[in-house]
Image (spheres, rainbow, N blue to C red):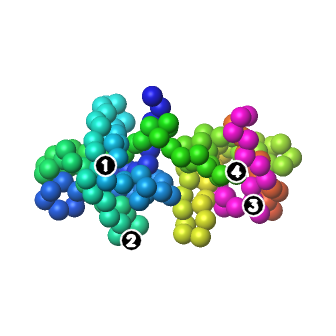
Amino acid sequence: MKLVSIGKIINVRGLKGELKVKSLTDFSSLRYKKGNELYIENEDTMEKYIYKVDGYSKSGDFDYVHFLEIKTIEEAQKFKNCYIKIAVDKLQPLKENQFYFYQLIGLEVLSSENKLVGKVSEIMNNGAHHIIRVKTQKGKDILIPFVEAFINKVDLENKKIIINKMEGLFENEN
């Protein structure tokens, strides 16, 4: 079963084991709905636990999730820096030209002239829209707004994103 990350546990809140989560999904209230079964995975040790959501709230940029099986702050603290994941088969289908973050990570980014820019390493949300972080072959990071003005085509089948010509993108590379 393939799992995708929907949040990273960055801390705990309160004495009853509530988890402070940096969200990696645009559907937090749906993902953390009471009764949903989700996975917590430690990517270093590859340990996975399945837990049932008991409560959810949002404050500022963070989600706060409580699982039925985690009852104390001590139990919750062992999950710091772990990821909350969901099975891919539990994801809802998206509309045309909408994508889940996991589908974009690792895709090659090419210019409209078919020149390799790099690979998508992260997707961020700045509030107005999403931004893709592209790691170039030289190790440099480039931030590209994930909006129609910059993104020409997303081709999941061929694992690439074609971007529109951007002034200055290749000027300093030789």
Going by the numbered disc 4, the residue's amino acid type is: Glu
Q: Position of residue 100 (x, y in %)?
A: 57, 48
User: Which of these two is toward me, 149 or 93?
Assistant: 93
The residue singled out by tag 3 in the image is 148
Going by the numbered disc 1, the residue's amino acid type is: Gly
Q: Position of residue 34 (x, y in %)?
A: 31, 53
User: Which of these two is toward me, 76 or 87?
Assistant: 87
Quadrant assignment for the N terminus: top left
Q: Is residue 16 above or below residue 136?
A: below
Q: Secondary structure at mark 2?
A: loop
Going by the numbered disc 2, the residue's amino acid type is: Gly
Q: CA distance from mark 3 to mark 2?
A: 28 Å
Q: Position of residue 70 (x, y in %)?
A: 18, 47
Disc number at residue 60? 2
Going by the numbered disc 3, the residue's amino acid type is: Glu
Question: Residue, x 35% and y 42% (percent of image)?
Answer: 38
The residue singled out by tag 1 in the image is 35
Question: Residue, x 54% and y 69% (percent of image)?
Answer: 127
